[in-house]
Image: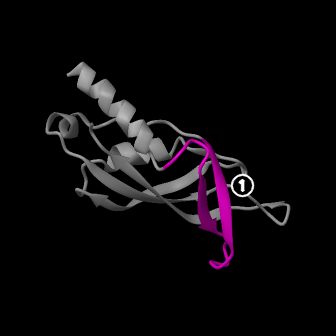
Amino acid sequence: MKVLNVLAVFVFALFFSGPLFSADKGYLEDGETEVELTRISYAVPIYPRKALRLEIQGTVRVEFDVDKDGSVLDPFVVEGNPPGVFDRSAIKAVRKILYEPPTHNGTPVKVNNVQIDLTFKLS
């Protein structure tokens, strides 16, 4: 079981919403101006034990805001498939993401409505 758990985490890391330095997008308060964000760090989510034991795979879409310092604010699940199975793990991991501090026209800004997809997949 430990080998399967380690393998699942490794495989999950490969599918965690793209590469480590990926670009995500959100919007300024006007809701129209799109801002590209650069993710500089994140924590690999823990695969839930029950999902691992039952060999359940799935995806979670999480939405959040990014503060002027690059930290994640108020993440919540937009959609989970299967519902509720991976939500807690996804939220815990997303809270640990750090972005380069976002700017627009050289001014630090808060970015709203950033969405990322997390894929939980076993090999």
**Residue 119 in the image, given as x and y percentages of width and height:** 36, 49
Disc 1 is placed on an element classified as loop
Left or right side of 3 for 30: right
Q: Is residue 9 magenta?
A: no
Q: Examine the image and state in which quarter residue 51 appears.
A: top left
Quadrant for the N terminus, please.
top left
Q: Is residue 34 magenta?
A: yes
In terms of depth relative to the viewer, which is nearer, 74 or 121?
A: 121
* Residue at x-position 30% and y-position 43%: 121
70 lies above or below 51 = below
Left or right side of 53 for 15: right
**Residue 90 in the image, given as x and y percentages of width and height:** 39, 47
Residue bearing mark 1? 68
Tell me which amino acid carries mark 1.
Answer: Lys
Coloring applied to the structure: one colour
**Residue 108 in the image, given as x and y percentages of width and height:** 79, 58
* Residue at x-position 48% and y-position 55%: 75
Left or right side of 108 for 94: left
Which region of the structure is painted magenta?
18-40
**Residue 35 in the image, given as x and y percentages of width and height:** 68, 66
* Residue at x-position 44% and y-position 45%: 16
* Residue at x-position 37% and y-position 39%: 12
